[in-house]
Image: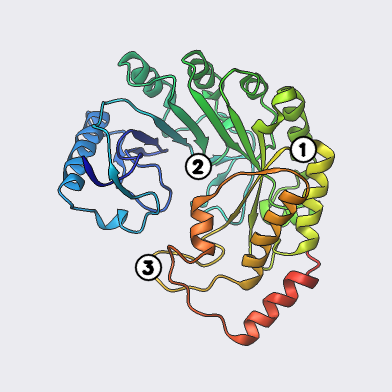
Amino acid sequence: MKYKCCDHILGSIDLSFSGFKYCNEVWEGPEYISYKEENAFEKNEIRRLKIIKDMQEGIIPERCKLCPILEEKDWKEFDGKIHKITIFNWKHCNAACFYCSVHSDFFEGIKKSDDYDALPIIEKLIKEDRLTSDTFVAFMGGEPTILEEFPAILKILLEKNCRVEVLSNGIKYEPSIGEMLKAENHNTICISLDCGFRESYKRIKRVDKFNEVTSTIKKYIKDAGKKANRVKVKYIIFPNVNDNKKEIDAFFDFCKQAGVKTVARAVNHVESKMDTTSNQAIETSVIKAYSYFKRQAAKFGMELQPEPWADAIVENKVYNCRKISPFARLKAECHFFFGNKK
């Protein structure tokens, strides 16, 4: 049947620190259903079926209308299988990034979330035969590797032959990820380094762990061996922080030295003052840095991971950004070409 819908609605689940929802897009989508509600999982699935029916009738929820994932095509009938799971812990981290949109609590070395344990939920999905060998599971939000249940969840997912990606800050080296990278499935880890210098790292992450992270990246690349392209290193661009050539060049110098094969770029919608309710400007220096990063990746023969949301922001396909004044544009241009942020 042809109608507007998306893969998230037709087979994904978001496990956040407070509840469920069927869409794992960060900025939009449905409200969470609290884990504390009776039959929370079942309520989420009832809600999923309702929105599928609504969309088949042409009723698009307001919170979905701006989503670039929404697509009109001939969709397959919902078969009850979950094809993507996103596990957010959000609240617990061993960094204190200034760009964190949820203002995560900073707990050095914390091991277990007080709000939920995702392990029994994953076990329930497996017991009910809701997962397949095509199911993709992403760990993100906060720092997954410091949660006590992380190795156990990863183990059963690999036994099920699910494909896994871990988004990590890389401060802690986790041996189970090293084993994950060797598995037959194309499992990956994406580490946000976001800079090329230790001083910049301290400014962005608000912890002095640059050397630990670069060491962790090298260890995972060694673990992966010939599958080193599974270790991705990310650079989130922030205005007046790391949106300059010197910082990007230093980032790529490290990547070359470490043997990095895959890189990723993004722009932070919070720090760029982007949202879906007001017309905001994205700095010219950020746009130029975004483009320069792509050219450098091509120059050094590194694979560049697609980032649809970042592309949509930079290309003004999602946000109606106001024009920048000539003076502000000139200032941003000068910052990009002559910036000396460390």
Q: Which residue is mark 1?
A: 212
Residue 59 rendering spot, x and y as whole percentages: 18, 53
Comparing marks 3 and 1, which lies closer to the viewer?
A: 3
How far is mark 3 from mark 2, CA to CA?
26 Å
Residue shown at the point (40%, 72%) measured from the top left: 278
Q: Residues within 10 Å of mark 2 (few under 14, many from 20)?
A: some
Comparing marks 3 and 2, which lies closer to the viewer?
A: 3
Q: Residue 169 versus residue 338: which sits nearer the camera?
A: 338
Q: Residue 117 versus residue 57: which sits nearer the camera?
A: 57
Residue shown at the point (53%, 57%) measured from the top left: 311
The answer to which image quadrant residue 44 occupies is top left
Comparing marks 2 and 1, which lies closer to the viewer?
A: 1
How far is mark 2 from mark 1, CA to CA?
22 Å
**For the N terminus, which image quadrant?**
top left
Say if 126 sits above or below 29 in the image: above
The amino acid marked with disc number 3 is: Thr
Residue 146 rendering spot, x and y as whole percentages: 59, 31
Q: Residues within 10 Å of mark 3 (few under 14, many from 20)?
A: few
Q: Residue 159 versus residue 43: which sits nearer the camera?
A: 159
Say if 263 sits above or below 332 in the image: above
How far is mark 3 from mark 1, CA to CA?
39 Å
- Which mark is on residue 91? 2
**For the C terminus, which image quadrant?**
bottom right
The amino acid marked with disc number 2 is: Lys
- Which mark is on residue 277? 3
The amino acid marked with disc number 1 is: Glu
Residue 85 rendering spot, x and y as whole percentages: 42, 32
